[in-house]
Amino acid sequence: MNPELQKQISSLETKTNLILTIGTLLGLAWFIDKHLFSLGLESLSLFSFAMFCTISGSRKIARALYSEVKSNVWNAQRFSQISPPTLLIGKLIGPALHSWVVGSVCIGVYLWQAKDKSDGLETTCIAILITFLCHALALAYALLQVQQNRIRRKDASILFYPLVILFVLPHITEIFLPAIAEIKELLKQCLWYGRNYNTYNFLASSLLGGVTFAILAAYRMLCAELRIKHLPFVWFFFILTIGVFISGFFTGTGLVDASRNILSCSVLVACLLSYFTGVMLKVPEENYSILKKALLSKNWREFSQESPLWLLSISIGTVIGLINTVIGIDPIFKNELITNLGVVSLTIAIITLRDLIFLHHLRLCLQNRASEFYFIMLLGTINILLPSLDLPVGGTKPIFSDTAIVLAVNLILALCFFKLALRTHQKILTTATQQVVQKS
């Protein structure tokens, strides 16, 4: 049996706090049902499920992994013969098992109260799917946090800078923010690719897809911890799936228009993920030496396996942007600023490539400092301040008006930054080699 599950199940027999919590919840439900029915036992049951199962269970999953890292148990598991599926089931279900017991009581009380309502089972299904999604995301985030703390050799938050970075990306937010507002309106009638869908069924299907990808993300992170390498097909499929999902709100049933719109949305998703993963995830310096050797030897399998997520994302975005540019104009995406999203998507991909190469250069130059902070400051300067001076380096207005000029300028800048990063990396390797020779 799974050791993590066995440990949690054996502790259920002596978990007096669990029995007291369930008894308190049942007693409170009986008292409200008999004397305070106006408070709304259905809402209270769903709120209790969210607190005791969704939120508390997610915290327990993350905290269990952190405690194992601090007690050096995690390293023993990493270097053991435990398979990733076994670890995934244990880490995902084990720490949250007590929360699910309490949550099942809350859901049972809700179903008891909503037995005469037509949407009781649908609401329960959505609540459970949201909980699974939160638990899988909590495990994936905890694994990322542990990995990054090991690489950075210090405890650091990996969510702060990715959240801030949205404010310095006008060329993406000018497209996505109106799209998000329109998606909220379209969800009320749920028109997707020209077809009408039941709102609950659509949300349940979308949440099921989100749970699947979140579990896959946690699984791939566990494989990385166990040093099991895979080709990045899942990441490519994830970007394309998000592009398909978003574009469905803005296009009809026509195959040509839908395919163009899917490609455009996929490029924007790839660029946004490039910024997030580039700022959030730091890569060991030796990783770039491995990439260089794989590139020189034309070992594309190893190159794709060792590539960081930001490089994979922007490579996917650039290739799709090139295809979209060749296909031609994309008039379906609803934004009055854009006349040809195909070329615009390629331009945004090149701008993203420029920025991420510059971030890599900063990290090489500022190895022990907060290079992400300086990167975001410079990013704001490049994408907000300089375009206001009518310089074709980025920003919303130049991209949408002088696309060809902006594309050419940023392609040259990306090549210059790439050459500068290569020189800096070679200099660091030469210095490290000289230090080793001197010590020997």
Image: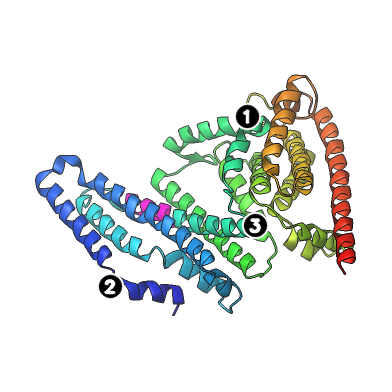
Q: Quadrant of residue 430?
A: bottom right
Q: What type is the residue that disc 2 sits on?
A: Thr
Closer to the chain start, of discs 1 and 3, is 3
Q: Position of residue 299 (x, y in %)?
A: 83, 65
Q: Which secondary structure class fits the magenta region best?
A: helix
Magenta residue check for 128: yes
Q: Position of residue 258 (x, y in %)?
A: 63, 41
- Whether the residues at callouts 2 and 3 have beta carbons within 8 Å, the answer is no
Closer to the chain start, of discs 1 and 2, is 2
In the image: residue 421, left or right of residue 91: right
Q: What type is the residue that disc 3 sits on?
A: Arg
In the image: residue 210, left or right of residue 257: left
Identify the residue under disc 1. Answer: 174
Check the picture and name the quadrant holding the C terminus: bottom right
- Whether the residues at callouts 1 and 3 have beta carbons within 8 Å, the answer is no
Residue 256 seen in the current view: no
Closer to the chain start, of discs 2 and 3, is 2
**What residue is rendered at 68% in x and 47% in y?**
278
Residue 45 seen in the current view: yes
Check the picture and name the quadrant holding the N terminus: bottom left
**What residue is rendered at 46% in x and 54% in y?**
133
Q: Position of residue 273 (x, y in %)?
A: 64, 46
The vertical placement of 287 against 342, above or below, is: below
Identify the residue under disc 3. Answer: 153
Q: Quadrant of residue 408?
A: top right
Question: What is the number of the mark on residue 435?
Answer: none
In space, the residues marked 1 and 2 are separated at their CA atoms by 55 Å
Secondary element at image label 2: loop
> Looking at the image, which is closer to me, 320 or 409?
409
Q: Which residues are magenta?
A: 122-132
In the image: residue 431, left or right of residue 58: right
